[in-house]
Image (tube, grey):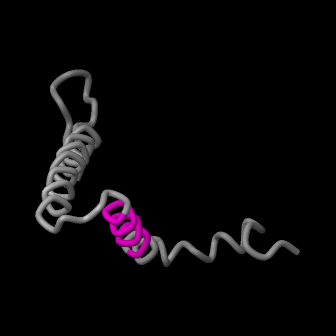
Amino acid sequence: MVWKSNRKDRPVKPMIFALLTAAAWGIGGYFEKRGLHMGHLPPQLGITIRTAVALVILGAVSFPHWKTLTQAGLLFPR
């Protein structure tokens, strides 16, 4: 389903996703700082935890596409 705006039939869906991403980015930063402050944790630990969680989530989401790395010759070049 693609939503259309009234102005020259431009799709609205990418703009909605961009706004949701910006909101999630800002809200996530707030909770990260709040959690570090409440737990009396150093910022380096917060960055490490955030990176580890992102790696796991992005790895799980992109798993079906990992085979394209070998097809492109990036993982095990012939």
Quadrant housing residue 6:
top left
Q: Give the range drawn in magenta.
A: 45-56
Q: In which quarter of the image is the C terminus?
A: bottom right
Instruction: Inspect the magenta stretch and tell me whether residue 54 lies in it.
Output: yes
Can you give x and y, in whole percent of width and height, for residue 71 in the image?
A: 72, 71
Identify the residue at image location x=73%, y=73%. Answer: 75
Asked if 14 appears above or below 27 in the picture, the reply is: above
Identify the residue at image location x=19%, y=54%. Answer: 33
Can you give x and y, in whole percent of width and height, for residue 54 in the image?
A: 38, 67
Q: Nearer the viewer, residue 53 or 18?
A: 53
Tally of marks: 0
Q: Which of 18 and 10 is in front in this view?
A: 18
Can you give x and y, in whole percent of width and height, for residue 7 in the image?
A: 20, 22
Identify the residue at image location x=34%, y=64%. Answer: 50
Can you give x and y, in whole percent of width and height, for residue 45 in the image?
A: 35, 66
Asked if 24 appears above or below 7 in the picture, the reply is: below
Quadrant housing residue 9:
top left
Identify the residue at image location x=22%, y=51%. Answer: 29
Q: Is most of the magenta stretch helix, strand or loop?
A: helix
Residue 28 vs residue 58: left or right? left
Q: Which of 26 and 34 is in front in this view?
A: 34
Asked if 61 appears above or below 9 in the picture, the reply is: below
Instruction: Inspect the magenta stretch and tell me whether residue 47 lies in it.
Output: yes
Residue at far right of view: 78
Residue at far top of view: 7
